Image (tube, grey):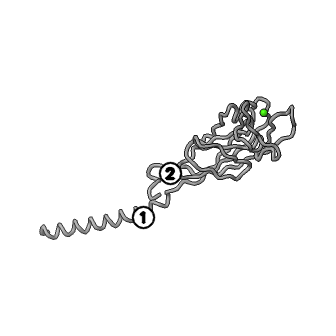
Amino acid sequence: MNSPTTTRARIGAIAAAAAVVAGGIGLATPAVANAAPVTKTITIDAKTAGANNVFAQSGVTVAAGSTVSVTATGTATFDPGYTTDVAGPNGFSTLNCTSSPESQCVLADRPFMALVGKVGTADPVLVGAGPTTLSGSGPLSFAFNDNVDGFANNEGSFTVTITYTPPCTGIFCFGS
Ligand SMILES: [Ca+2]
């Protein structure tokens, strides 16, 4: 039969062994801290994305402290009655949208029909064909650069590809 002193010593040894095991688990967990990058592709319509300064939502939300990378392809024109030339996501390189008291541009003094992006409620920025890195916090949205009241005569669309790392949540955030 064990004496009380021996029993307490054995309990202490078991507790110490458990602590070593727990420490081992803790060291292994950070390996799953970050999710893999995700790519999402959307198509935006030149007649609607940016009309009346309402941007097209991408469905991607930028997490504070993270970045997204954006590329775009496609063609669009801003007024077939004026010119049938088409522009890619960099817009008409020799033709900027200039705001006036009567008509505002999505992004003044930048090329007509260039791809413009916005994160949350921050000021819009020129995205173009990219790859362009955007940061901030909030929903990511896009527009064509035209006079905000002049989208009805636009034609075309852009395909926008967004690459981002989803924010980690729950137990997968251990160690991040
Ligand atoms: Ca137009």
> In front of the other: label 1 or label 2?
2
Of residues 74 and 103, the one nearer the viewer is: 103
Q: Tag 2 or tag 1, which sits nearer the N-term?
A: 1
Q: Is residue 124 above or below residue 66?
A: above
**Residue 83, disc:** none
Q: What's the distance in space between the residues labelled 1 and 2, CA to CA?
A: 18 Å
Q: In the rendered image, which quarter is residue 160 located in?
A: top right
**What residue appears at the point 74 percent right and 41 percent down from the top-left corner?**
158
Residue 103 coordinates in the image, percent (x, y): 73, 32
Query: How busy is the neighbourhood of tag 1: few (under 14 within 10 Å), some, or many (20 plus)?
Result: few
Q: Badge 2 is on which residue? A: 168
Instruction: Give, as a three-letter code, the residue at label 1.
Output: Leu
User: Which dot marks residue 27?
Assistant: 1
Question: Which secondary structure, mark 2?
Answer: loop
User: Nearest the camera: 94 or 84?
Assistant: 94
Is 158 rendered above or below residue 30?
above
